[in-house]
Amino acid sequence: MKSNRRTFLKTSAASLPLAAAIQVLNPATISAETIAATATSGTVPQLTPLPARLAPVESSTLPWQQNIRRVGQSNMTEHDPAVMNIEEWADYWHSASADIVFISVTGILAFYPSKVRFHRQGKFLNGRDFFGECVAAARKRGMRVVARMSPDLNWGDALDAHPEWAMRDANGSVLFSDEDPRLFCTCMFTSYMDDYVPAIMREINSLYDVDCFYTNGWPPIGSLPDCHCAICSKLPPSNTTAYWRAFNDRVLELWHKYDAIAKEKKPDSFYFANLGGNVRCGPNLARLGKTAAWFQADNQGRTSENPAVWGCSLQGRVCSALMEGKFAANVSAAYSTGTVRWRNASKNPAEARMWLNETLASGMALYYHFIGSEAGFGEDRRWQKLGSDYFQWAKKHDAHLKPRRSLANIGVIMGQSTQLLYPPPAAAHADDYMRETTHGIYAALLDGRFAFDFVHEDRLDLERIGKYRALLLPNIAMLSDRQCQQIRDYVRSGGSIMASFETSLYDENLQRRQEFALADLLGISKAGDVIGTNGNAYYARIERSHPILDGFSNTNWLPGAQNRLPVRSVPDPVLTVVPGFVQYPPELAYPPASHTDEPAVVLREVASSRVAYFPGDIERTFWLTGHGDLLRLLHNTIRWITHYEAVVHVDGDGFVELLCWETTPGYAIHLLNYTNPNAHHGWLSTVYPLGPQTVSITLPSGVKVKAVDLLRSERTIPFRLEGSLLRFTIPGVDDYEIAAVTVG
Ligand SMILES: [Zn+2]
């Protein structure tokens, strides 16, 4: 869309209350300054040049796992030694160009003749070295091997000998597996993890040549344990900040211990564990990110609680924030994930493919997973061709698909501690509240085609966040004084922020503050407690013209949010609160007070920094309602705080996710097409292709373009250079396209 004087007049007038708009349309009432100011605040982004390119890195100098691009796993069952055709299994993953395969050692059932006490051999093993045969078959084909273990469950004989190994409920009763009560749940604070798991690792190292070790089922994903065994009874209660610290210390202690054991045989071996849960991961990701050599994102498919199609790329953005170039892979289930599961049947091909698309687009390595090999190599073999076709296609384009750094200019603070521990307003379910907040801001950013990264709250040093034009804080309730100071320093250095609701109202120990820690920066002061909704939610009255109101016309009221924290009045407000009121009966559906001086948004400008604060939980309310006014308000505000700057502009129809990377050969612009009736529910069953998408980026000075290739449709397309401004048009997008720019 071109911005000219005429459209600016239209939009700025449209953002005013009706009576005022009539005045503004009379040119005599508009000053030259107003025109100049508004003319630079249209909706066409100003493209900022990409940063100078990174120095090249020779891939052979990287740790081996950083050159892994494809991971294969046929998860082994107790029955597999009786039925699985090892040659067929190994041939499949080899022909699919898997660089590495997972092979089960386990810990629940031994897949080899283990001598470790309580490491029970499966009933179909019959003394056979199934693990060793699989390792040999993989090695023969040049594939690396992950030794896969499961420390989370064990059997009754172990419980009889070691009752102290079990997790217990508040009554002291042992916790058992929900599905198979013969198995008890092991407690991570006990000697089970200190003695039993290391004994198996050392036995494997003594018998086999494996590349690294992995534990499944531990640490927990997305929640914290709640155990009342003798050891845990002495710890702070679960779901407190003090427990979270003890939990993190123990995870790190065991991680380091297992990593050292892995390295006893080979210095380039390592240990890694189950992670995932995206922004709501159990262990502190900032700490783990320093330690982990491999981020195993166990985030295999959509669920009814987490129904958005972007679940995998959301996870990828988390990995990218934490791993900073180290290895991350997302486990894509080829089997049917979700609330009702069929782990031995393939899922919809369009859904499986989209999860793989998202894996690549968000910068992770491909990882394809199925369970069990009945009848040789599976009763259901439909998943196999899809996986091997996808892997082989990706292999052709490895250089363009491996990111070096994100080009995003917006950072979204994740707030991991808020995600795990924050108590939301009374009416909301704690587990759901922050997930809805995350999806709200995520959906809004996708819809506006913004280029954004996640930023962890413990990684707010200016060297990291200085590259972002703006930081978004969607109800990041828990922030320490230090983190608040880092955000202040960021704004002082010229950065902008958008924050909402209870941001900074709690410290890192979940102590509620009397006043927002960021009150000074946000220009706000708390004026009461959270007000929820009973009937109509509150409204925001338009008080005056402002760029964040571009596009609103013919209304004095906009929707507010479900919950808000009242803040004191500010001079010259842009939006004020019309408090909520009865919605039924309609006779009473009118505001007792139609005008207040309570702000519904607080905006500040200090030098080149712009600061916006919404007292409502606006992002989450957008997710709950889908209200287009909230979407427009979020988009306008993000554009205003970023001074309408962008690093990439992709113009075209459709609801897409956009990710942009610098790569070794040049740049990669990824477009995921979510324009689909199943974007928010169920699985994709078909693809609804999009028309042309025109991409504009401004290259760093001196960078020349050799070619622009579309990697999914495998064609070269023409491009145009106007100075350093590069433009090209992708003729269409099926489910996924990558425009790979090769520079020279
Ligand atoms: Zn315990």
Image (cartoon, grey):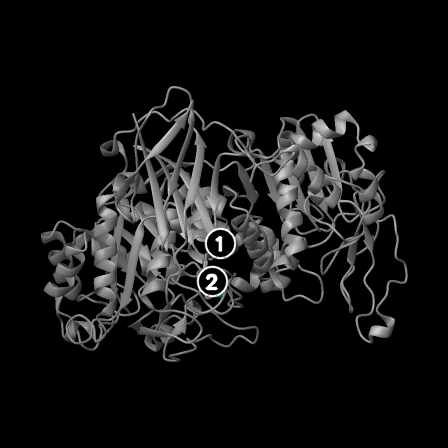
Q: Quadrant of the C terminus?
A: top left
Q: Quadrant of residue 44?
A: top right
| In the image, the residue with mark 2 has its CB under 8 Å from the nearest atom of ligand 1 | no
The residue carrying pointer 1 sits among few (fewer than 14), some (14 to 19) or many (20 or more) residues within 10 Å by Cα, namely some
Q: Amino acid at mark 2?
A: Ala
How many numbered marks have been drawn onto this rendered protein structure? 2
Instruction: State the SS at label 1.
Output: loop
CA gap between label 1 and label 2 equals: 9 Å
Tell which of 36 and 460 is nearer to you: 36
Earlier sequence position, callout 1 versus callout 2: 1
Q: Amino acid at mark 1?
A: Phe
Tell which of 22 and 343 is nearer to you: 22
Closer to us: mark 1 or mark 2? Answer: 1
- Position of residue 601 relative to residue 487, above or below, is below
Work out whether residue 672 can be spotted: yes
**Dot 1 corresponds to which residue?**
655
- Position of residue 113 relative to residue 585, above or below, is above
The residue carrying pointer 2 sits among few (fewer than 14), some (14 to 19) or many (20 or more) residues within 10 Å by Cα, namely some
Instruction: State the SS at label 2.
Output: loop
| In the image, the residue with mark 1 has its CB under 8 Å from the nearest atom of ligand 1 | no
Extreme residue toward the right, this view: 592
Q: Is residue 44 left or right of residue 672?
A: right
Q: Which mark is residue 679?
A: 2
Q: Quadrant of residue 720?
A: top left
Q: Are marks 1 and 2 in contact (CB under 8 Å)?
A: yes
Residue at the (46%, 74%) spot, across then down? 175
Q: Quadrant of residue 716?
A: top left
Q: Position of residue 514 (x, y in %)?
A: 79, 47
Residue at the (68%, 34%) spot, across then down? 610
